[in-house]
Image (cartoon, coloured by chain):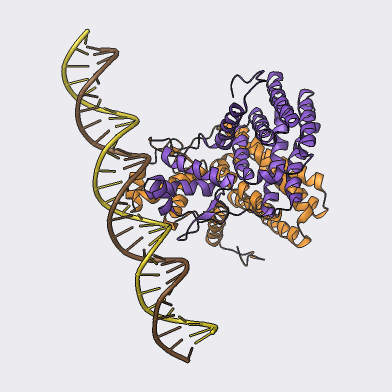
Chain colours: A purple, B orange, C brown, D yellow
Amino acid sequence: MAADAGGLAETVSARAADLGQLREELLFSALRGVDGSSSLAFAIFRELAIGIVEGTLPPCHEVNSAELAREFNTSRTPVREALLMLEREDLVIVPPRRRPYVSEVALSQVREIYEIRASLYGLVSELLVDRASDEQIARLHDWQAKLEKDAQAGDVDGYFWHNVGFRNTEASLSGNRELQRRLSSLGLQMHRFRHLSLSLPGRLINSLADHGRLVRAYADRDVAMAVAISRSLVWRGYRAIERSGLM
Amino acid sequence: MAADAGGLAETVSARAADLGQLREELLFSALRGVDGSSSLAFAIFRELAIGIVEGTLPPCHEVNSAELAREFNTSRTPVREALLMLEREDLVIVPPRRRPYVSEVALSQVREIYEIRASLYGLVSELLVDRASDEQIARLHDWQAKLEKDAQAGDVDGYFWHNVGFRNTEASLSGNRELQRRLSSLGLQMHRFRHLSLSLPGRLINSLADHGRLVRAYADRDVAMAVAISRSLVWRGYRAIERSGLM
DNA sequence: CTCGCACCAAGTGTCGACACATTGAACGTG
DNA sequence: CACGTTCAATGTGTCGACACTTGGTGCGAG
C-alpha cells in the first residue's frame, strides 16, 4: 500500500503479494472494528469467508461446527461464533437445529443487491462532491492511474481489486462512516461472483473510461454528472453478470 | 393486524395491545428469518434490544454476560450469542476482552444513518412506482387512513408506529427483500431516539400531508415526485431530532 | 500526600461433556 | 417391491468449569 509511487519495475511476485494484501485489506476493512469478540473466532471467520468468496467452499456445502473444530484445533465454541458472523454477512445459513451450509445466491438476489449498491454509490458521489477536498480527489486520480496501468497490461485481477480500492476510497471520502461500513458489507457478498463480472471482453475499456469521467466530474464538482456515472458504473457490473448467463 | 377494517369503536386497552403487537412485529420483522440459531439466544436478544430501544438500558450501561446469565437462568453461552447479535445491530459494543456496554449514538451518527435512509427510501419509492399494483398501493392508502385517525386524535405514539408500518409496507412493495431487510436493520437503530423525533408540535400535520401526497404520487405513477417526497419525509424526521437539541 | 506496585475479585474466552434433535439406513410389514 | 417404523450415528444447543486478563484496591516507598 505505502510507497507505491512510481513503482514501475515491480517484479511479478511482489506485485502479487501487494495485491493479496490489498485484497485482505479491502475484504475485511468494514469488519476490523466489528471484530466482535475473540480473535480466534475472527480468524476462523476470515478463513471461511475467504474460502466461500474464492469458491473453495461451494454453495450448499455443509459446514458443521464439529468438523471445523477438529480442523482448526479448537473447541466448537469459537467455530459457532464464526458461523454466526458468516451468517450476518449472508455467506452461510444457520437453520435452527440443522446443519449450517454455505448460502446460495440467486440472480434475483444479485440484482437486489446491485440496486442497493447503485443507490448508495449515488449517495457516495453526492456527498463526496460536497465534502471532499481537492487533495482528496487527487487521491482518486492516483487510483485511476493504477486502473489505467492494469487495463493496458490486461491485468484483470489487478484491475478488479484496484477498482474495489477506488470504490472504497470514494466511500471513505463521502465522510459517512456508516455508509462506508454498509457498502463494504454488501461488497463482501459481491466478491463471490466477481469472476463472472470480469469475464466479458471490452468491459475493462468501458469501465476505465467511466472512471476517468467520474474523477473529472468530481474535480468539476458536477454533482448530477458524478451521481449518474457512479450509478451507471454499478449497473454496468450487474449487466456483465447478467449477460454471462452463469447464474 | 388482521381484521382491523372499520374497527371504529376500539377500547383503549385493546388499542394499546394492538400497538404493542405491531411494535413487536415491526421491530423484529427483519430478523425473523435471520433468527440465527437457538430461540433462547434470540429471546434474550429481543429482551435486551427492547430494553435498549425503550431506554431502560441507557447508553454506556455495562451488560456483562455473567450477570445476564444469572438473570435469565441460563448459561453464559446463549447470552454471549445474544450480545453478538446486539453488536451486529449496533446496539451494544463488545470490545475484545473487555466488558460489553450499550452503545452511544452521537448526532453525527444519526445524521449518517438518515442520509442512508433518505437514499434508500428514495430507491424504495422508485421501485415501488414501477412494480406495485394498484391494489398494493391501495394498502398504503389504508395505512394513511390510520395515520389520519391518529393525527386527529393527537395519538403521537400510534402515529409513530403506524408510520413505521407504512414505511415497512412501502419497503415490502418495492419487491426488493434485501432492501427491506437493510432498512429494517437501520430502523432498529432509529427507534432509540424516536421520542425526540416526535416531540415537536406541528410535525404530525406536516408529516401527514406529505404522506397523502406520497400515496397520490404512487397512484399517479409519478416517480420524480414520489422520490422527492419520500426523501423529504426522512429529512423532516432528522431535522426534528436536530432541532430538539437533545443530542 | 502522591505515586508505584503487588494483589484480589470479577469477567471473558475457551474447553469438554451431556441431553436432545435430526438424518439416514436397516428392517419388517402390507 | 413400496412404504412406514425403529434405531444408531452424527451434530446441535446448552451447560458448568478453568485459565488468563482486566480493573480496582490497598499497601508501602519516596
Spot occupied by residue B108 in the image (x, y as percentages of width and height):
59, 31
Which residue is drawn at the image coordinates 56% and 44% (left, top)? B191
Front residue (pair B219, A33): A33
User: Residue B39 is drawn in which quadrant?
Assistant: bottom left
Q: Is residue B202 visible?
A: no
Number of marks drawn = 0
Spot occupied by residue A241 in the image (x, y as percentages of width and height):
72, 48
Left or right side of A220 for A197: left
Spot occupied by residue A218 in the image (x, y as percentages of width and height):
76, 26
Front residue (pair A32, A154): A154
User: Residue A10 is drawn in which quadrant?
Assistant: top right
Q: Is residue B243 above or below residue B161?
A: above
Front residue (pair B106, A97): A97
Q: Is residue A98 above or below residue A238?
A: below
Q: Quadrant of the N terminus of chain B?
A: bottom right
Left or right side of A223 for A75: left
Q: Quadrant of the C terminus of chain B?
A: top right
Spot occupied by residue A144 in the image (x, y as percentages of width and height):
72, 27
Q: Is residue B194 visible?
A: yes
Front residue (pair A18, A23): A18
